[in-house]
Image (cartoon, rainbow, N blue to C red):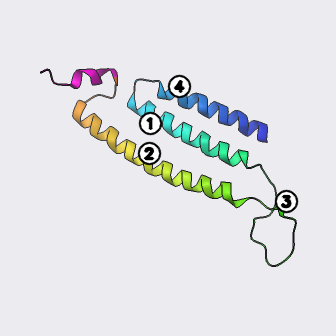
Amino acid sequence: MEVVLAILVGILYTAGVYMLLRRSILKFIIGIIFMGNATNLLVFLSAGLIHGSPAFVDGTTTNSAQLADPLPQALVLTAIVIGLGMVVFILALKYKFFEVTGTDDLDQLKQTDSQK
């Protein structure tokens, strides 16, 4: 399972970089989303996949090696929330950019400056 997830991380990073290099702002935003999801999956995967019980134990003594580490899960959850806020902000900027310029192409951004 870890090999499949590692390949998925590589595919997401590759697709994210490819989308970041496109000329459309919407594809740029999708690339940022792919890169964020790949990073979250990488952090989650680097903690190791443990098929154990959660870290909440009801007073019994158990082997701590069998418990799932809650820190990477908390980091990924925080990163998901921050990433969602960032995507909403970028989409608002894209909407304003489209209102002002009337285009989605970044090459036409050079022509929006006023000639002095």
- Residue 57 at x, y percent in the picture: 78, 73
Contact, mark 1 vs mark 3 (Cβ under 8 Å): no
For image coordinates 54% across by 51% down, the residue present is 80
Mark 2 and mark 1: Cα distance apart in space:
7 Å
| 74 in magenta | no
7 is higher (above) or lower (below) than 37: above
90 is higher (above) or lower (below) than 69: above
Q: Quadrant of residue 106?
A: top left
Contact, mark 3 vs mark 2 (Cβ under 8 Å): no
Residue closest to the far bottom: 59
For image coordinates 83% across by 64% down, the residue present is 64
Check disc 4 and give the amino acid type. Answer: Tyr
Q: Which residue is mark 4?
A: 18
Check disc 3 and give the amino acid type. Answer: Ala
For image coordinates 55% across by 42% down, the residue present is 36
Earlier sequence position, callout 1 versus callout 4: 4
- Residue 76 at x, y percent in the picture: 61, 52
Q: Is residue 93 left or right of residue 26?
A: left
Residue stretch rendered in magenta on the structure: 107-116
Earlier sequence position, callout 3 versus callout 2: 3
Contact, mark 2 vs mark 1 (Cβ under 8 Å): yes
Earlier sequence position, callout 3 versus callout 4: 4
Circle 2 — which element? helix
Which is more foreground, mark 1 or mark 3?
3
Q: Which residue is mark 2?
A: 87
